[in-house]
Image: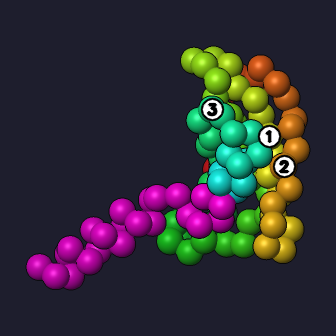
Amino acid sequence: MQKRAFLLVALAVAGCAGTQQQNAEDALAERVGEGHVSCTRAARIAYLQELNTKVFLCLVRHGAADCDRYRVTRRSSRYSVALLERHSDCVLPPS
């Protein structure tokens, strides 16, 4: 029973946002200050192991179909944020 519970918890954690993705989202949220922020996921091997990912494509949602598109790049321990497009669609590429 404990093995099953552990496996379920491990699978649930693996499906959640990784720390690199969350850090990119936090850096963008600090920069823009408003709207719902979402970024592409970090690269993974076999769904469980997160790889070192340096570039994230992100959206800041202002309305149902109104988003600003950003590129968030990790450089050492800090993140740089670049606006790519204002008032774009609200669809991230698959990750």
- Residue 86 position in % (x across, y down): 82, 24
Left or right side of 38 for 88: right
The image shows residue 19, relative to residue 85, as above or below, that is: below
Q: Amino acid at mark 1?
A: Tyr
Residue 48 coordinates in the image, percent (x, y): 50, 71
Q: Residues within 10 Å of mark 3 (few under 14, many from 20)?
A: some
Residue 11 among magenta residues? yes
Location of mark 2 (residue): 81
Q: Residue at x 37, y 66 (%)?
A: 11
What's the residue type where badge 2 is placed?
Val
- Label 2 crowd (10 A; few <14 / some 14-19 / many >=20): some
Q: Would you identify the image quadrant in which residue 69 lies?
A: top right
Q: Which residues are magenta?
A: 1-23
Find disc 3 in the rendering and name its residue.
35
Q: Which residue is mark 1?
A: 70
Of labels 1 and 3, earlier in sequence is 3
Residue at x 84% of width, y 74% of height: 76
